[in-house]
Image (cartoon, rainbow, N blue to C red):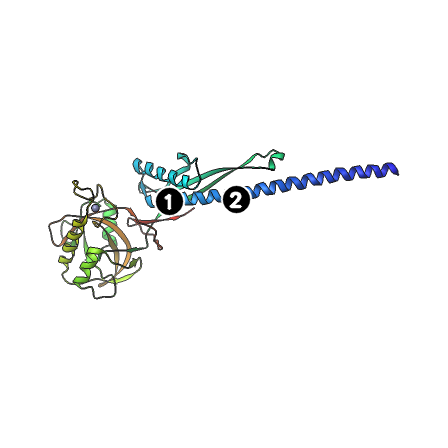
Amino acid sequence: MGKFIKDETGISAIITALVMTIILTATALALDIGAAYVDASYAQNAADAIALSIGEYLPVEQNDQSSKTMILAAANEFALKNGVYDLKTEDVIFCGLEDGKYKSVSVSVKKTSVTKLAKIIGVDNIKITKSATVSSKPVGSIKGAVPIGITEDAYDTAMATGNTQHVILKVGGGDGVNGFYGFIVLDDSNGNAVVLEKWMKYGYEFENYVGEILPIATGDKTSVVRDGVNYRLSLCNHYVGYDGCKVAHYVEDCPRVVFVLIYRFVNTNTVEIVGFAPFILEPSNKDDEIQGSFLDINISYTEKITEKDCGTYTYRLTG
Ligand SMILES: [Zn+2]
């Protein structure tokens, strides 16, 4: 009997030791996994922040090495600000290739979460990789539009034929031109010449958006465009000695860069906006013509985005 009791005590001690070991191991793992979750969340936040910081540089031409290098440098700079000291070139992947342009960048942040208690079961660290993808998206709204636009068909034809530089737009069209433009009234005023000229020179002060229905302005407004274009051309103070801003080199917020409305007719005197195309104005001697080149520009954050790509972009985290 005495022997039996002694044995039972021994078994109890073994069971207690086993249970204690299991509880301690579980606790150790729980604490270290908890810490790893915190590290993972830091890594995700850092990846998101780095991706967002380079969104404004998208899209980038497939072979534009200098822009890609600049984007990598910007990503690195932002990584350091977010406590990521080992971002490598292969952690920044250009993707979303479309029409010869990368529309997205994916950023991976790697972090090693060093364990404390789990070391007793042979787990020294937990490796974490978190990624974020930022993509350029066509803007769905814009401030500062000019009251001129071209039809979606004319824009699509220009893009499809590669006829995007030194384009001549003429009032009402005609032979030997690349398209015609019309005047659009951007608010609920009657769109008289004074108002149109103000918008042409300074841009509309409120927001226009895709899907907005606007009336066309009628009557001869050629002087509006001539005065507006000349005024904007004169305001450029960049690239002094190199003809100022032009398609080969320009500053994105130069007054020479306007956002032309891309629209489709709803009926003969009303249009619906389908997009906004950046266009750099060039000198032209003719009163009924506008000359310029279409650009790709990423403006700052806009609340609305759209599907149709007219060359004006904002950005979003897409993964
Ligand atoms: Zn300029």
Residue beneath disc 1: 53
Mark 1, secondary structure of its residue: helix
Q: Is the N terminus in the top left, top right, bottom left or bottom right quadrant?
A: top right
Mark 2 and mark 1 lie on one chain; the one further toward the N terminus is 2
- Report the residue at 60% width, 43% height from top: 30
Visible in this render: residue 171? Answer: no
Q: Amino acid at mark 2?
A: Val
Compute the Cα span from label 2 to label 1.
23 Å
Q: Nearer the viewer, residue 289 or 49?
A: 49
Label 2 packing within 10 angstroms: few (<14), some (14-19), many (20+): few
Label 1 packing within 10 angstroms: few (<14), some (14-19), many (20+): some
Question: Which of the labelled discs sits on residue 73, or is there none?
Answer: none
Q: Position of residue 67 (x, y in %)?
A: 31, 38
Q: Is mark 2 within 8 Å of ligand 1?
A: no
Above/below status of 193 relative to 62: below
Q: Position of residue 244 (x, y in %)?
A: 18, 44
Above/below status of 64 relative to 270: above
The image quarter containing residue 25 is top right
Q: Nearer the viewer, residue 82 or 306?
A: 82
Q: Position of residue 136 (x, y in %)?
A: 35, 47
Q: Position of residue 115 (x, y in %)?
A: 57, 37
Q: Amino acid at mark 1?
A: Ser
For this orientation, the residue located farthest to the right is 1
Visible in this render: residue 28? Answer: yes
Question: Which of the labelled discs sits on residue 38, or is there none?
Answer: 2
- Report the residue at 19% width, 46% height from top: 237
Q: How many marks?
A: 2
Mark 2, secondary structure of its residue: helix
| 169 relative position to 87: left or right | left
| 81 relative position to 160: left or right | right
